[in-house]
Amino acid sequence: MKTQRLTALSSALLLASFSANAATEIEWWHAMGGNLGEKVNEMAEKFNASQDDYTVKPVYKGNYTETMTGAVSAFRANKQPHIVQVFEVGTATMMSAKGAIYPVYELMQDAKVPFDQSDYLSSVTGYYSDENGNMLSMPFNSSTPVLYYNKDLFAKAGVTPPKTWEEVEQVSEKLLANGTQCGFTTGWQSWVQIENLGARHNTPIATNDNGFSSVDNEMLINQSPFVDHIAKMADWQQAGIFEYGGRRSDSAPLFYSGECAMYMNSSASYAGVRESVKDFEFGVAKLPYWDKAVEQPRNTIIGGATLWVLQGHESEEYKGVAQFFSFLSKPEIQADWHQFTGYLPITHGAYELSKKQGFYAKNPGTDVAINQMTEVEPTPASKGIRLGNFVQIRDVINEELETVWSGDKSAQEALDEAVERANGLLAKFAKANK
């Protein structure tokens, strides 16, 4: 009996010792599948191996929409993760979730982890900061649209990459005359051809600085330059200059196959383009602007996602979250992520390290997005977009643009309808968040 008691006591002491030394677990929900998901796991493993106090556990939860809605549901059930990856169009929704989020700047202060916002690219952090410039979430995978072009077709036609939309038309006409089937196609049409068109031309797509200064907003995309641009694209479609390929990145095969000589999409598409283009060399150029509409083009705005921290956990666990964010921001970690994925480096240090390592010299065009984002200071119209129900609003814009491409509506009719429908969604959000 005495031996049994001693054995039980020893087991209890061992269990207590193990529990005391066990690493605190940090759960991270994300939307990165495939190779990106493997890279996310690798980053977490590196952090876990770098110290003994915390273990970050990445959990893939589906696409961006599924990940965000899943986290919201989990919070209501008090089963929320510590960290959730949310795409940029969910920013206003996350900000409106009072009491649910733990702002990053407060997290770092409370955890007493060194944190200097000036280390991060202002064109990235501005999207995710409050009215006082404080970062609310941690930038993670940020991108911006660029123009990919087929160097072989360009050489055959004797043309150079266009800087303006006027040149896109001229270059496309020469390409078509030399046997190319299509001048250009685009991915993420709302983001590239509406949202970034506005930013590039210093024109807001909505009132109150694109929603940054109020929740009472109305859309402005049924005005110039938006209507003029979409009307021109409709004309180009009839002439064979433009070909529509789908709402997201569905148009990529039109470029990969050599059918379309130009392809506008995320800078984060670089790795996919490099892997998929087999029969020609490609280049990267900045997103065009209308020379007749603006003297100095502004920066494009970002896409991608950030990491939001959710309330409801112990203070010791949040210390681990803060240390993990500090780890993710290290130049060597960010440079590796940037070079592997094509996403922007979120810190100046990561950019300088990538340049020092010769990455941009070895991979021409990979610095185009960074230069496009940083060569001018963001304005209220090019800082970003913070509209409620923006996920649904993008769907509305996509639906209405497709009526233009099908010939069922004019650009003005479609964008008028998009504004009316979107304003209804904005009104609902404002009513719920006053």
Image (cartoon, grey):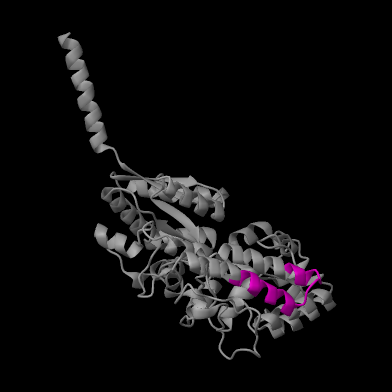
Q: For residue 171, which quarter of the picture? A: bottom right
Q: Residue at 80% across / 80% down in the picture?
A: 173
Which residue extends farthest front?
431
Query: Magenta segment range?
Result: 402-423
Q: Is residue 418 magenta?
A: yes
- Tell me residue 292's x, y (percent): 66, 91
**Viewer-proximal residue, 392 or 140?**
392
Residue 279 higher or lower than 37, as above or below: below
Q: Is residue 251 left or right of residue 375?
A: right
Q: Residue at 76% across / 69% down in the picture?
A: 403
Q: Quadrant of the C terminus?
A: bottom left
- Tell me residue 378's x, y (percent): 47, 80
How many numbered marks, from 0 up? Answer: 0
Q: Quadrant of the N terminus?
A: top left
Q: For residue 131, which quarter of the picture? A: bottom left
Q: Is residue 188 visible?
A: no
- Tell me residue 194's x, y (percent): 63, 75
Q: Residue at 55% across / 55% down in the picture?
A: 65
Specify the principal SS of the magenta part: helix
Q: Residue at 57% across / 62% down in the picture?
A: 391
Residue 78 higher or lower than 430, as above or below: above
- Tell me residue 133's x, y (percent): 36, 74
Q: Is residue 369 visible?
A: yes
Q: Is residue 207 magenta?
A: no
Q: Is residue 108 left or right of residue 127?
A: left
